[in-house]
Structures are given as structure tokens and as C-alpha cells.
Image (tube, rainbow, N blue to C red):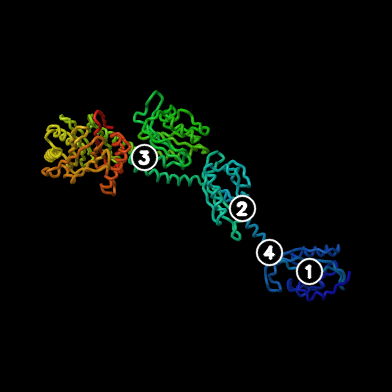
Amino acid sequence: MPELEPEVFDSAIVPIAMTAGSDHVLVYCNEAFRTLFGPRPLGVPAREAFAEPRAAPFLAMLDEVYQDRTARQVTSPRTTEGAARGDSGVRHFVYSCSPMVSRHGPGVLTVAIDTTAQVEAVQRAELLSEQRHQALQRYEALMSAVSQIVWLMQPTGEIEELVGGFQEYTGIPWRPMIDQHWLSAVHPHDRSRLVSSWREAADGTPSMFVCTFRMRTASGVYRHVQSRAVPIVRDGVPVEWIGTTADVEDQWRNRLRERLRAKVAQVISANDVPQAFAAVTDAVVPDLTDVCAVFLLPPGGQHGTAGTLSATRIASTAREGLPSLPPMSHELRRLGPVAQQVVDSRRPRLFTFAAGDPPAGVLPDLSMSWLREARATSITMVPIVIDTAVVAFAVAAGCADSPPPGPADLQMLGEVLHEVRDPLRQALELQRTRHTALTLQRALLAPTPRVPGAELAAQYQPASRTAEIGGDWYDSLLLPDGSLTLTIGDIAGHDLEAATSMSQLRSMLRVIAYDRSHLNTPAESLTRLDTVAEGLDIAPLVTAVHARLERRPGGGWHAAWSNAGHPPPLLLPASGRPRFLEGDGPDLPLCVAPWMSRTTWHYELRPGDTLLLYTDGLIEVPGTDLTEGMAALAEHAEQARLRGLPLETLCERLLAAAADRRDDAAVIGFRPIAPGRVLSARLT
């Protein structure tokens, strides 16, 4: 081995030292060595020159290299505080020791290489990696704590579950692809919407994807979840999506509850029972069920043979995509013993069955036919109890691939029905009171007589928003000479006092017309009535049309009438357009100026002509004047006449077409017929 000359290392920038002999006498160190390690005495063994404890590994390596003449290296940190270079801190070195021979004999050459920068870079990288690992662990723990599934999706549809929970939530093993297997856990009614929403987000401008849908849980019950995802975009193109899926059933039901309450609030303003129950069915479809119907029980409830029940389908609503519901009918439909059991137990009952195969005897045949056509799979019957009595029951049905309702759905349906008890009670009470008032009103209105050579019909309809007795009336009276009187009138007010006044005036006018039938004109009869009513203070204000009809040869009738402030009679000629018989205008109402003279007007009715007397309830339209209502009445009447409807049916149609039902309404019609025919009309 050639001898090394120590002086060749004087200008080296790395620290270098030489030792000689087995005692490792320090024979040389360059300036860089002294700068880093401080002055070291030459000519002394290394154990004296490097007496600090941290030098022990270095001294042991000197022994090994000297003995087996094999190069070695050791890494060691070193605190440079107080060193000759003036800086301080921990620095890292690699000490490389190699055997050599110098003029001092065999020894060891030591080179110190500063690796502080490399070591610190590695340490920083390790620290960053550890921090990232800790952050991921914290994120996973956080996601697990809030019951979210965290996933990463590639544009190809491959999906990775970063934070698990899918299998635990759904009971379905996780699969790394969005396919029908994965979608099988999604509610059938939500699948197409979920897929289309995702495609729209993925194919369009990169933006956040948010979709709420129902997912089947491991217990088989569907719950609402919400998936949210954001794209990772590079060069304007999404390269992957990171998202979460979380259970939001409680939040969804709270929002649904508020929406249902807002819808159910419509029941409070409902004018009648059908409208009130229609608001209920509209509220629950389609959020809670595919179809909902309400069957109203009659006051007695029990009809037909033992164990059977009858009811009227009073309201029904179905979601889009299902067959059209059967038309409403006021007829009582016989139900089966199952409905009786639900009513008796006052508990909901759920039936599940194969699509389109509902059990027999649950609902009326017409409803069962519809359920079969709609491929219903479940029926839920819920009694509606008001004041300890079952007044109706609701039927909710799931159709096609809809799963049966779960306990939460039944609870929500029960809450809706509970919310509407008070307004339904009011609507039912109003219906009962209106029925009583109508019965009393009709008792005060005499049935129309049979009139040879003419049709005669009359109809009365109470106001839809009041349970009071109205002041509208009509009357018809056959006189001894064969003539006929017709009267239509309206007394201000909707109470018992108005009804009493109406009854008194009607009776007095009948007496006046009958007593001097061959002498009194209609104007004279109204004048006498006006005088008596004013003198006895019977009513504050009365409008009326009083007519006298006398038979003419050939089937015609002569009409004479007087108008006391009332809407004019409507004439529907057998040929020609309808027109109002207004004359020069009406006289003053009754009970205003009884001393004023009144006018009698005349018209010759031919067979087939129709004369209609009516109250203002048929022509009053909110926000318009009476002329528009009169034009609408004439149009409805003409359409009915052109269809050849019987007079009684025509009157029914006119009442049904009334634009505003806030006031009661009455109509009486007269139609001459060809000789030889005798028709009768009845109050309906």
C-alpha cells in the first residue's frame, strides 16, 4: 500500500484526520477538521484527543478498521454549539474510516461528511407523511362518527369506499362498480332520478352533485340518504369525484312534516266535507303513498247484512303514472267484513300481496278493480276518529314496485290524520247543520203541483259556506179558475228571522193571490203584500217576482208578472236566443215605499218556451257586475235547452253551474207543452 502524504489534504473542504498505530495517535487534521471539531492536540492517542463520551462509536470503529484493514463508516449526530465555526445546533455526519500507510506507519484515514441537509430532508418527509397519516385517521374517525360513507369514483364508474359502512347499512356487499347490483338498494321510484342526476352532473360543467333518495337498509326498511360529491378537476376535466353518503331520514321527515302541515292547513279553509278530505289525500300523495282515498261512513255506519259496512268514497288522489281513478259517486258502497274490523278496532291494518292481487272483500268492487289495474302491492286502512266516533277511514295503497309502508310511514300518516281532526270536525258539523237547515228550508217550500199542459220544476240550493237557513224562496199555486201563480223571492239575511219572514210573506201572498184570483193583477197582489208587510214590520227588505199564468187555446199560456226589485225573468224561446224580460226595469223592492204604484208586464208563451224565475245566487260573481252573471246564466240555460233536457234537469244544471256558492239560490221554471201531455215535477 503506498504511503499517503498528509499535506495533500490541507486544502480539502471536507474534514480529514489521520491516526497511526494501534493507539491511534492523532498525527494529522486539516483546517476543515479543526473548524468543525475544534483544535485537537497532535501526537496523542485518539482516546485523549477525542475524550468526549459521544466519540465512543468512532473510537471503536478505529480499532476494527486498524485490526482487519477493512473500511467502515458510522453515522452520528453532533451538536456544534461552541464549535470553532461559531454556529450552533445539531448536525449529522457520516464518518468514513479507511486503512492507510503514512510516513508515521500504518494507521487509519478518517473523512467526516456533513449529511445534515439530507437527514433533515428525510426527517421532514417522514414528519409530513406521519402528519398526513394522522389527518387521514382523524378524517376517517370523524366520518365514522357521523355515519357517512366516503367514496372516490373514477370517470369509468369504478368506485372505492374510503370510509366504509355501505354493507353494514344496506346488508349488500360493497362492489367497486356502480351497476344494477349497487342500484338494487335504491328505492325503485328513485333509481332513474338518481342516475339521470348523476349523468347530468358528470357530463355537464363540473359542479357539486347533490341528490336525496331512498335506500333499503339491512332491516329491509327504506330510509332517505343524501349523496354529495365534488369533482377533482385537472385542465377543466373531472378526473375523479370524491363524495359522501349520509342518512338524512330524520331531517327529511322533519321537512316532510312541515310540508304536510302547510298542505293540511288547506283543510282549515275547506268549505265542505269533500273539500276537506280532498286536502288530506292531496297532502299525502306522493310523499307517503301512491294513492289515498277517504271513505265517509253514514251517520249510522252499519248497513246491509250483519258484519258489513257501507261508505261513500268522498275523496281520492293518485300519483302520476297510475290509471285514472274512478269518478266520484254519492252512492253508498257496501264494504266487506275487513273494513268493519278496522272500524271496530280503531286500529290501522296493513295488507301486502302480489302485484295486482288484492284480497277480496276489503273495499268496494269498483275500487278493487282499480287496484288490480294499478298492480297494487299493499293496502293500508286507517280509521279516522273524531270525538270518539269513527266517521271515515283512509285507504293508502302502494302500486307496482312500491314497497309496503314502514312503521315510520304509518306513523306519519297517523300524524297527518291527527292534525286535521279539528278542521274535519268543523266541516262535518257544518255538513250536519247544513243538512238540518236544508231539511227545514225545504219543509217551508211547498212541492210544485201537477199542471196539465205544462212542465213545472223548482230547485233550491243552500249556501256552501253557511249552515244557516236562507231567505230565498219560491212558490207555485194553482188557482180555482185554472190559472197558475209563480213567485220567486229573496229576503235579506241568512238566519231564522229571515226564514220566518220568508214563511210569513209566502203565506200572505198565497192568500192574497187565491182570495181575489180573478180580480188582482200581479202588480196589485204585490202592492197589497207590500202594504201588509210594511204595516206588520215583517221584513226590512224583500225582492220578488210574482207571475200569473193563464192557459190559452192551442197549448200556449199568457204570462203576466210584476217585478219588485228582483233580477228579471229569463225566457228560453222554443226557437231563438234567450232573453231577459226586463220591460222598463223593475219596480222598487217591497218594504221600501208601499204607496208607490207597481207595473204588470205581459208575454205570450208558446209550447216549448221556457220561463225561468231565479234568485241572485245564480248570477252573482265576485268582482263582476250582475250583467256578466246574467249572460252566463243565459248561456248555461241555452246549452241545456238545446240538449233537450227535461225542465227539472235543466234547473239542476243551472244550480250546479253557479259560479259563486256563498249565497243560497233558488230557481223555478215553467214550460208549456203540447195539448194532451201531462208532466209532473217534484222538489229534489
Q: Amino acid at mark 4?
A: Ala
Q: Amino acid at mark 3?
A: Ala
Residue with the most extreme right position: 1
Tell me where residue 3 appears, x and y as whole percent: 87, 72
Tell me where residue 7 appears, x and y as whole percent: 82, 76
Q: Residues within 10 Å of mark 2 (few under 14, many from 20)?
A: few
Q: Amino acid at mark 1?
A: Val
Q: Which callout, 1 or 4, points at the residue further toward the start of the chain?
A: 1
Instruction: Tell me which residue sits at (57%, 48%) in the image.
Output: 149
Between the C-alphas of marks 2 and 1, the distance is: 56 Å
Can you tell which mark lies on residue 276?
Answer: 3
**Tag 3–tag 2 contact (CB < 8 Å):** no
Q: Within the image, what quadrant is residue 426 found in?
A: top left
The quadrant of the rendering that contains the C terminus is top left
Residue picked out by circle 4: 121
Q: Residues within 10 Å of mark 4 (few under 14, many from 20)?
A: few
Quick check: 385 left or right of 434? right
Q: Residues within 10 Å of mark 1 (few under 14, many from 20)?
A: many
Can you tell which mark lies on residue 155?
Answer: 2
Between the C-alphas of marks 1 and 3, the distance is: 99 Å
Quick check: 535 left or right of 676? left
Between the C-alphas of marks 4 and 3, the distance is: 77 Å
Between the C-alphas of marks 2 and 4, the distance is: 36 Å
Q: Secondary structure at mark 2?
A: loop
Residue picked out by circle 1: 111
The quadrant of the rendering that contains the N terminus is bottom right
Q: Secondary structure at mark 3?
A: helix
Q: Between residues 370 and 392, which one lies in front from this camera angle?
A: 370
Residue with the most extreme top position: 306
Instruction: Tell me which residue sits at (48%, 29%) in the image.
Output: 359
Between the C-alphas of marks 1 and 4, the distance is: 22 Å
